[in-house]
Image (cartoon, rainbow, N blue to C red):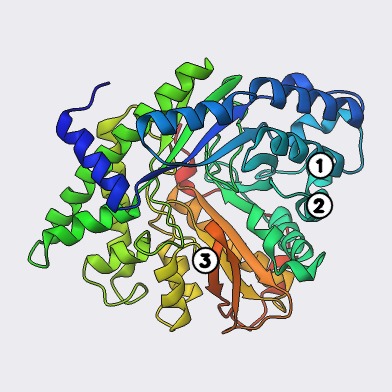
């Protein structure tokens, strides 16, 4: 792959003026050979493999970043789902495993480590249940460990027993240490149609169909796309806007593939995927809401927002596909409320609410993300929010997710501030009417008719 001089100059301008960066380089590791008959042995094998295979990840990524002049914000590791690795050891809790991988991540200088995960979209194993019940303690006792669970898919339907349990786990995670203001829930997410090579936290894991190790790259560039649209001026029609987004996504993807291939080559690990999702940050000018408003919306959340987001998501995917054969499944636009300054402001002034955010997830990359809700929200209501999002993913054959943050002691209209990339957000109201009887029915929502493709 080669870049023209003009592409290099354009990319340098994007980096300098428009917040272009590589959001993450994530190494995926298969841990199947680490399963053992005791928790102690399992922890030792897992830590040894992380430290051995991941030893050079951080220095190599930093070296490539410096040589290429491309900011690389995060260095991460994604592991095989630990409910599979821990199954053989007969332990009653996977907290020791979470503490062990957290310690290994700290030693390597990794920002986050994903894979404290279970795949239960069709049913539970005993090990899956142990992992579920270990999540609250594990996330409160560690800094870098992230947990994710698969609750549904288009082929399998939705495991409503797991949806109910997930609501309870989110609630317990938030209230185990109320003084943390829901911070551990920032590391917990559930999915419908979960992908196996997601480089983004909190949903990063190394799927069972992946190679022994791989390098996955998450690119980001909402500021670049925003600038490209604004350069068009108000006279450009929406077809021209889509073309501008496609061209910009093409350039962003080329840059990301260059970085990914170089890191992969230096580490001797195969290149997995490029995820060119437009992931915002709290920095001014690095916002998905700003991009949508550049298209002509007065505020993100007004009528037309879902249409604008659909245009953006589609154009990003089309531009990326033309630039690389390794584009990942999530590529598009993320809408994490607390991590997007303008989006959080729109929620604060009432232009954007939970119902509109849910509607937007029908066309965006993932789903309801980093949304702070009142601390007195019942666990069954959290499960109801999750169920709605899982059905959107199942019926539309797309990946959807939920990462909600109950804030102990806080009510709708108040605010939570985490700082850094996690940002701050107003606490949004949830529907006060109960869905408990529906959630408590349990069972499974069957797969839709469109799942019968053979």
Q: Earlier in the sequence, mark 1 or mark 3?
A: 1
Image-quadrant location for residue 230: bottom left
Q: Earlier in the sequence, mark 2 or mark 3?
A: 2
> Please, what secondary structure does the residue beneath circle 2 have?
helix
Q: Which residue is mark 2?
A: 141
The residue at the point 72 percent across, 53 percent down is: 162
Tell me if mark 2 has few (under 14), some (14-19) or many (20+) residues whose alpha carbon lies within 10 angstroms of its own: some
Identify the disc placed on residue 259.
none
CA gap, disc 1 to disc 2? 7 Å
CA gap, disc 1 to disc 3? 27 Å
Say left or right for 67 vs 292.
Answer: right
Q: Which residue is mark 3?
A: 338
Say left or right for 192 vs 84.
Answer: left
> Please, what secondary structure does the residue beneath circle 1 have?
helix
Tell me if mark 3 has few (under 14), some (14-19) or many (20+) residues whose alpha carbon lies within 10 angstroms of its own: many
Q: Quadrant of the N terminus?
A: top left
CA gap, disc 2 to disc 3? 23 Å
Q: Earlier in the sequence, mark 1 or mark 2?
A: 1
The residue at the point 50 percent across, 32 percent down is: 62
Q: Which residue is mark 1?
A: 99
Kindly give the residue lying farthest to the front in the view shown: 66
Kindly give the residue lying farthest to the top in the view shown: 268
Q: Nearer the viewer, residue 71 or 226?
A: 71
Say left or right for 401 vs 44.
Answer: left
Tell me, yes or no, whether the two marked residues, 1 and 2, touch with CB atoms within 8 Å.
yes
| 326 is higher (above) or lower (below) than 139 | above
The residue at the point 64 percent across, 83 percent down is: 433
């Amino acid at each position: 792959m080669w870049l023209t001089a003009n592409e290099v100059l354009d990319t340098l301008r994007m980096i300098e003026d428009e917040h272009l960066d590589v959001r993450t380089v994530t190494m995926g590791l298969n841990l199947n050979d680490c399963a053992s008959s005791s928790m102690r042995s399992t922890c030792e094998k897992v830590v040894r493999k992380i430290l051995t295979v991941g030893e050079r990840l951080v220095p190599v990524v930093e070296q490539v970043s410096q040589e290429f002049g491309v900011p690389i914000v995060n260095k991460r590791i994604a592991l095989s789902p630990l409910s599979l690795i821990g199954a053989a050891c007969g332990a009653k809790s996977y907290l020791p495993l979470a503490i062990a991988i957290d310690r290994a991540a700290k030693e390597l200088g990794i920002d986050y480590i994903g894979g404290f995960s279970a795949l239960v979209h069709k049913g539970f194993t005993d090990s899956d249940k142990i992992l579920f019940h270990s999540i609250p303690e594990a996330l409160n006792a560690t800094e870098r460990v992230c947990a994710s669970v698969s609750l549904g898919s288009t082929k399998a339907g939705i495991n409503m027993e797991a949806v109910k349990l997930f609501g309870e786990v989110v609630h317990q995670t938030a209230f185990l240490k109320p003084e943390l203001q829901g911070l551990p829930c920032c590391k917990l997410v559930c999915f419908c149609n979960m992908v196996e090579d997601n480089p983004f936290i909190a949903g990063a894991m190394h799927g069972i169909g992946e190679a022994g190790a791989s390098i996955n790259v998450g690119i980001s560039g909402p500021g670049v796309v925003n600038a490209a649209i604004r350069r068009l001026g108000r006279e450009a029609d929406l077809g021209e806007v889509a073309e501008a987004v496609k061209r910009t996504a093409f350039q962003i993807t080329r840059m990301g593939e260059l970085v990914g291939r170089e890191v992969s080559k230096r580490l001797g690990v195969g290149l997995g995927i490029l995820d060119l999702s437009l992931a915002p940050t709290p920095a001014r000018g690095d916002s998905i809401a700003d991009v949508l408003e550049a298209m002509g919306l007065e505020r993100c959340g007004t009528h037309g927002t879902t249409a604008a987001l659909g245009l953006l998501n589609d154009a990003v995917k089309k531009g990326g596909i033309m630039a690389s054969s390794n584009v990942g499944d999530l590529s598009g636009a993320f809408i994490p409320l607390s991590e997007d300054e303008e989006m959080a402001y729109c929620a604060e002034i009432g232009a954007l609410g939970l119902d509109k955010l849910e509607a937007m997830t029908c066309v965006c990359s993932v789903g309801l993300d980093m949304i702070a809700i009142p601390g007195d929200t019942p666990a069954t209501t959290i499960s109801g929010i999750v169920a709605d999002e899982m059905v959107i993913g199942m019926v539309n054959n797309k990946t959807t997710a939920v990462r909600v943050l109950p804030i102990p002691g806080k009510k709708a209209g108040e605010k939570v501030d985490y700082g850094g990339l996690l940002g701050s957000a107003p606490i949004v109201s949830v529907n006060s009417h109960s869905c408990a009887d529906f959630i408590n029915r349990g069972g499974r929502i069957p797969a839709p008719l469109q799942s019968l493709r053979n």
